[in-house]
Structures are given as structure tokens and as C-alpha cells.
Image (cartoon, helix red, strand yellow):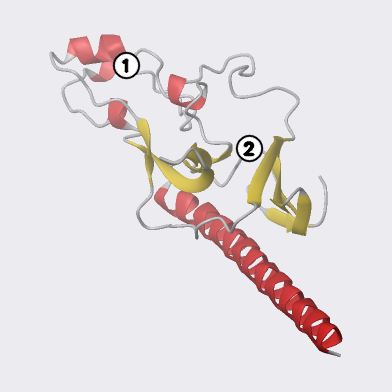
Amino acid sequence: MVVVILSIFAGMMSLSVGSSESRKNRAFYEHLTDSLSYVRLLSAERMQPMGLSLQADKQGQVAPVIVTLSNPYIAYQTDDIPSNSMDSTPKNSMELSADLTSMSGAIGKQQPVPSWEIEPEVSLPELPAGVSLRVQSLEAGNLSMPEQGQTLQPWFANQAVPQILWFGTGQATPVTIEVLHNSRLVGEVITIMPDGSMTIGQGM
């Protein structure tokens, strides 16, 4: 009789722990989708590139953080550059003049270089135990292989570029995001479309 009671109690404890883990994982998933929607709006409102980057912490655990490209238009924010030295062709944030070095020399001082920095206004919750993110690109190429006529800056084409990227124009890099708990899917697959919109449980 005692053995039966202990077995039932152990089973109830196991169910309770499993249910608690499931709730934490689901809460993280919902917080993540809400944050991605907010980042898309914030990036377009600021006209500033933003992204989600998977970064390792001090313990070596990889966690998602929201990042912002600082000084994306710094090359066009000085009054000391002669107007006839500027290309009047409109450019988006990916196609800013690639020759910042020569422009810096023209004004006699070094310009700040755009860089990816953690966004203080958007924070993601800590990853629950056993949870990881898998991000897969839906592009045939990648940002290091620009279309003909495009010149990409290094902050859009090196290893520091976020795995998920909104360009500040409403557009984004198309990717799928899977939240996994011990290799099992939590919720449904999240898809970021080229126009920046997000779908849940649907492909492109």
C-alpha cells in the first residue's frame, strides 16, 4: 500500500514538473513573438536597422538579444562635405556609400563607424533550461552576396550581422525560427517574410 502511494505521489510530482516546464517554454515563445513584432515596428519607426542576434554569455550559453545598428547614416550627417562630392542617388541603409574612409579624410577627422549594439529598450527573457533557437535563412543567397549594383557595408556582411535583420525600411531578411526544448518544437514555426511581416505555422 505504501509503495502504491509513493508511486502515485512520484507520478504527480513528475506531471507537475513537466507542466511547469511547458508553461515556462510557452511563455518564452509568446514573449519572443511579441518582441519580434515590436522590433519590426520600432525599426521602421526609427528608420534604423535592428535585429535579433544569438550571442554566447559568460558561461558559453547562446541566448537571443535584440541589437540596433548605431550611426547608420553617419556618412550623411556632416556639413563639411562638399555637396558636389555626394552621390545624389537615394540609398537605403544597406547601400550607404562604401567609401567612409575617404570621406573621413575629406573632413580631416575620423568618423564613427556604425556597429551593432544591444538595444536597451527591448529585452528578451532568459532562455528556459533546455530551450534553444534555430534560425534558418529562406534566401537563396545571403547578405555577403549582394545583387548587381548593390554595395554592402561590412556591418551587413560580416560575422557580427544579426541572424534576423530588419533594415529600417519595413523589409527584413526572410527566415524561419524554431523554439526547441530538448530538440522538440515549442509552439509553431515562426516565419519572418521579406516585407517584415511575421506568420506563425506557415511557410513562405
User: Which residue lies most toward the bottom here?
Assistant: 1
Taking the spot 36% from the left edge, 31% from the top edge, the residue there is 115
Name the image quarter holding the C terminus: top right
Give the image location of residue 158, x and y in percent: 50, 21
Q: Which of the 4 quarters of the picture holds residue 18? A: bottom right
Residue contact at pointers 1 and 2, CB within 8 angstroms: no
Q: Nearer the viewer, residue 177 or 78?
A: 177
| Rendered view: 5 above or below 153 | below
Name the image quarter holding the N terminus: bottom right
SS state under label 2: loop
Q: Which residue is mark 2?
A: 173
Q: Amino acid at mark 1?
A: Leu
| Rendered view: 61 above or below 11 | above
Q: Report the mark closest to the observer, 1 or 2.
A: 2
Q: Amino acid at mark 2?
A: Thr
In the drawing, what numbered circle is on residue 46?
none
Q: Nearer the viewer, residue 188 or 204?
A: 188
Q: Nearer the viewer, residue 168 or 56?
A: 56
| Rendered view: 62 above or below 9 | above
Taking the spot 40% from the left edge, 50% from the top edge, the residue there is 46
Taking the spot 66% from the left edge, 53% from the top edge, the residue there is 197
Give the image location of residue 93, x and y in percent: 46, 32
| Left or right: 58, with 16 as reference point | left
What is the C-alpha distance between the residues marked 1 and 2? Answer: 25 Å
Q: Residues within 10 Å of mark 2 (few under 14, many from 20)?
A: many
Give the image location of residue 40, x and y in percent: 54, 53
Q: How many marks?
A: 2
Q: Which residue is mark 1?
A: 100
SS state under label 1: helix
Taking the spot 64% from the left edge, 48% from the top edge, the residue there is 132
Q: Which of the 4 quarters of the picture holds residue 84? A: top left
* Mark with earlier residue (1, 2): 1
